[in-house]
Amino acid sequence: DQQVKQNSPSLSVQEGRISILNCDYTNSMFDYFLWYKKYPAEGPTFLISISSIKDKNEDGRFTVFLNKSAKHLSLHIVPSQPGDSAVYFCAASALGANNLFFGTGTRLTVIP
Amino acid sequence: DSGVTQTPKHLITATGQRVTLRCSPRSGDLSVYWYQQSLDQGLQFLIHYYNGEERAKGNILERFSAQQFPDLHSELNLSSLELGDSALYFCASSAQPDPNTEAFFGQGTRLTVV
């Protein structure tokens, strides 16, 4: 049972425009959410996170929005750059748990 | 370079065999996580160790086992291998036992069972 879902396997965006990657979750006990980015032949790298007590967290060009009532979060990248082309994984954890649940990833392609 | 080293990078073996995947965490990190990524799947959590102690188990098969040694490196043992065990196996490390702490991933071991 996939508790974290990324329903768009791929997304293409023009350089300079906004990229919006979406993530839905089913477990209402999740209280912390992370985004990881993965380039080919490399392991995932941490990008940004958000606690359930917030609805927005920003770090440079990256902003994560959390809508708890909809059990939905999104990652906005503005402006998108070709170097952002990668697979983006959403992950979630529940209070007191010792593991993360990952989505299946969205492959972002930024077209120069 | 994340500082996490996984060996081997690639492994091809036959069904029914046993393999050992090795992970050296970043210097100073006490937590080690193992994940499996099958084709078109997300990362499936297998097991978490902190300072030599098992902290959490995910969907890890009984044919799989792991341990973390006193020097903090970890090994994932996969036995009675089946075709469906073919996947990328990632190790990640972090300083704290909390999974919300940023984790650093190795490049992964690609296991192919033939």
Image (cartoon, helix red, strand yellow):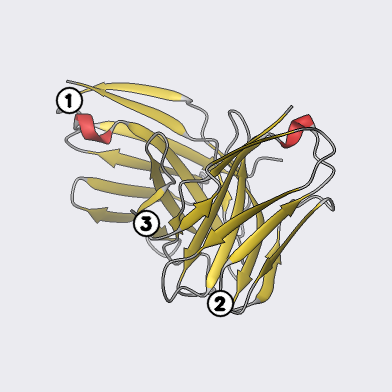
Q: What residue lies at 18% left-to-right and 51% top-to-bottom?
A: A60
Q: Does residue A30 appear in this view?
A: no
Residue B105, horizontal then vertical, whole percent: 46, 54
Could you give the CA–CA distance between mark 2 and mark 3, rounded to whole angstroms? 19 Å
Q: How many marks?
A: 3
Q: Which mark is residue B71?
A: 2
Q: Which amino acid type is marked by label 1?
A: Glu
Q: Chain of mark 1?
A: A
- Which residue in the protein does label 1 denote? A15
Q: Is residue A85 above or below residue B77?
A: above
The answer to whether one can see residue A2 in this image is yes
For mark 3, name the chain: B
- Select label 1 or label 2 by which is in front: 2
The residue to which callout 3 is attached is B2
Marks 1/2: CA distance?
46 Å
- Badges 1 and 2, same chain: no
- Residue at 43% from the left image edge and 53% from the top image edge: A34
The quarter holding residue A49 reads bottom left
Name the amino acid type tagged 3. Ser
